[in-house]
Image (tube, helix red, strand yellow):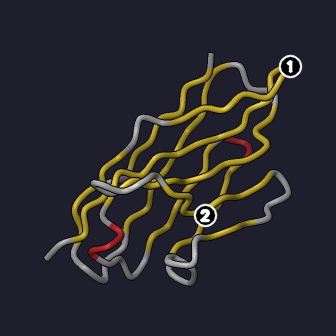
């Protein structure tokens, strides 16, 4: 079994910053991809940022230049640094990973609320 535990959400004013963390634990041989998704009320879940095992990154157009995804392989942890936050960034943020232990499996975190409001 694998667990993804998120932390770092909260309430922040427009223009502020937050850093989300996601730590994976359990039966892990390797983590092939680490992602962050978000889901705002009444909207579909969307990919925000992704990082591969080779450190290639990909970002949604709406967050390019403001958000940065990074990973610490030794800790099986990845991060989402969010700067210049806007009210439209308000959503529940979920971490996701493709983890190899024999086969590859998809795992999700429990979600953390990010609210950007004055």
From what the image shows, is residue 8 above or below residue 100?
below
Identified at 31% across, 83% down, the residue is: 15
Q: Residue furthest left?
A: 118
- Expressed as whole percent of the image width and height from the top left, the position of residue 101 reads 80, 22
Image quarter of residue 65: bottom right
Q: Residue furthest top?
A: 1
Image quarter of residue 41: bottom left
Query: What is the tally of numbered marks visible in this picture?
Result: 2
Report the side of 97 relative to 19 (left or right).
right
Identify the element where label 1 is drawn.
loop
Report the side of 112 relative to 94 (left or right).
left
Label 1 neighbourhood size at 10 Å, few (<14), some (14-19), many (20+)?
few
Identify the element where label 2 is drawn.
strand
Identified at 52% across, 44% down, the residue is: 22
Label 2 neighbourhood size at 10 Å, few (<14), some (14-19), many (20+)?
many
- Expressed as whole percent of the image width and height from the top left, the position of residue 5 reads 47, 35
Identified at 60% across, 51% down, the residue is: 78
Residue at the spot of label 2? 69
Q: Nearer the viewer, residue 20 or 58?
A: 58
**Image quarter in which the N terminus is found:** top right
**Image quarter in which the C terminus is found:** bottom left
Identified at 41% across, 52% down, the residue is: 93
What's the mark number on residue 53?
Answer: none
Report the side of 50 relative to 108 (left or right).
right
- Expressed as whole percent of the image width and height from the top left, the position of residue 25 reads 61, 27
Residue at the spot of label 1? 102
């Amino acid at each position: 079994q694998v667990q993804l535990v998120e932390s770092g959400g909260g309430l922040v004013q427009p223009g502020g910053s937050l850093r989300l963390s996601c730590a994976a634990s359990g039966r892990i041989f390797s983590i092939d991809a680490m992602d962050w998704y978000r889901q705002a009320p009444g909207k579909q879940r969307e990919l925000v940022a992704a990082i591969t095992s080779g450190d290639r990154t990909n970002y949604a157009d709406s967050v390019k230049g403001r958000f940065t995804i990074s990973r610490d392989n030794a800790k099986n942890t990845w991060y989402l640094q969010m700067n210049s936050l806007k009210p439209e960034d308000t959503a529940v943020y979920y971490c996701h990973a493709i983890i190899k232990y024999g086969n590859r499996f998809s795992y999700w975190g429990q979600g953390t609320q990010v609210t950007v409001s004055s």
